[in-house]
Amino acid sequence: MTWELSDLVRGLAQSPQPLFLARSPSLTRHATTANGARQLRHHAQMISALLVCMVIGIHDGDSLLARCGPPGDMRERELRVHGIDAPERYQSFSDTSRSSLAALCLNVPAHIRPIETDRYGRSIAQVECRGRDVARHQVTRGMAWVYTRYADTRPDLPPLQAQARKSHAGLWADSDPVPPWQWRHAQAHAR
């Protein structure tokens, strides 16, 4: 049986099986040959790749677990959403932030565009679920801060954070919310 790109995309909506896509005209060719499989593996390594994955777990408001890859070669990937930092476990507002991400992404296909790998081996990636940019969604709802390390690469996020803060959305309802990077620092020095 051969599959074309359009068949793979259509099949994703009907199956929990995650699929792999990349910006490449070669993927419109049949990909069941040995050469096609090699091309898919090669494209999986490209940083500009677009992965269509199934989100199978949520760690916190900015981290998730997804199953990605071509049929027969799917792998679990730990992902961190690029541009945001959500409350850590045991930090105030953590459960609400995590629930917000789960409501948007858990058990649905997600478009993942890896950007880099962090020191924990997670892919830092732009993530879309249900057609919504996850970073924008979380910041707009007051579920995460703009991560200052990446603020210059996501100029769309600071104005959304300012609006969420002004309207006391989510974590901004707290009179003095503690950014996760400060909370982590305090936890490290408390030991």
Image (cartoon, grey):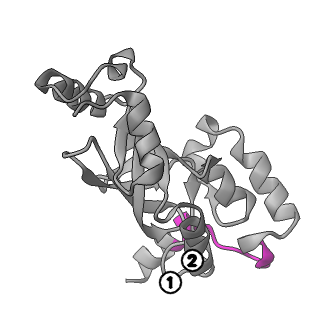
- Residue 148 vertical position relative to residue 38 in the rendered view, above or below: below
Of residue 71 and residue 163, the one placed in the foreground of this image is 71
Residue 143 seen from this side: yes
Q: CA distance from mark 2 to mark 1?
A: 7 Å
What residue lies at 81% left-to-right and 55% top-to-bottom? 162
**Mark number for residue 94?**
2
Residue 139 occupies which quadrant of the picture? bottom right
Verify CB contact (< 8 Å) between mark 2 and mark 1: yes
Q: Residues within 10 Å of mark 2 (few under 14, many from 20)?
A: many
Residue type pointed to by label 2: Ser
Magenta span: 172-183
Is 158 positioned to the left or the right of 178 in the image? Answer: right
125 shown above or below 64: above
Q: Position of residue 36 (x, y in %)?
A: 20, 24
Residue 72 drawn above or below residue 42: below
Side of 50 where 31 appears, left or right: left
Decide whether residue 114 is among the magenta residues: no
Q: Between residues 169 and 131, which one lies in front from this camera angle?
A: 131
Mark 1 secondary-structure assignment: loop
Q: Secondary structure at mark 2?
A: helix
Q: Position of residue 119 (x, y in %)?
A: 32, 52
The residue identified by callout 1 is 90
- Which corner quadrant of the image does residue 104 belong to? bottom right
Task: Identify residue type, mark 1.
Answer: Tyr
* Residue 182 belongs to magenta span: yes
For mark 1, does the 10 Å Cα neighbourhood hold few (<14), some (14 to 19), or many (20 or more) residues?
A: few
The C terminus lies in which quarter of the figure?
A: bottom left
* Image spot of residue 29 (x, y percent): 31, 19
Residue at left 72%, top 40%?
156
Q: Is residue 50 visible?
A: no
Say left or right for 96 vs 7: right
Residue that appears at 79% across and 47% down: 159
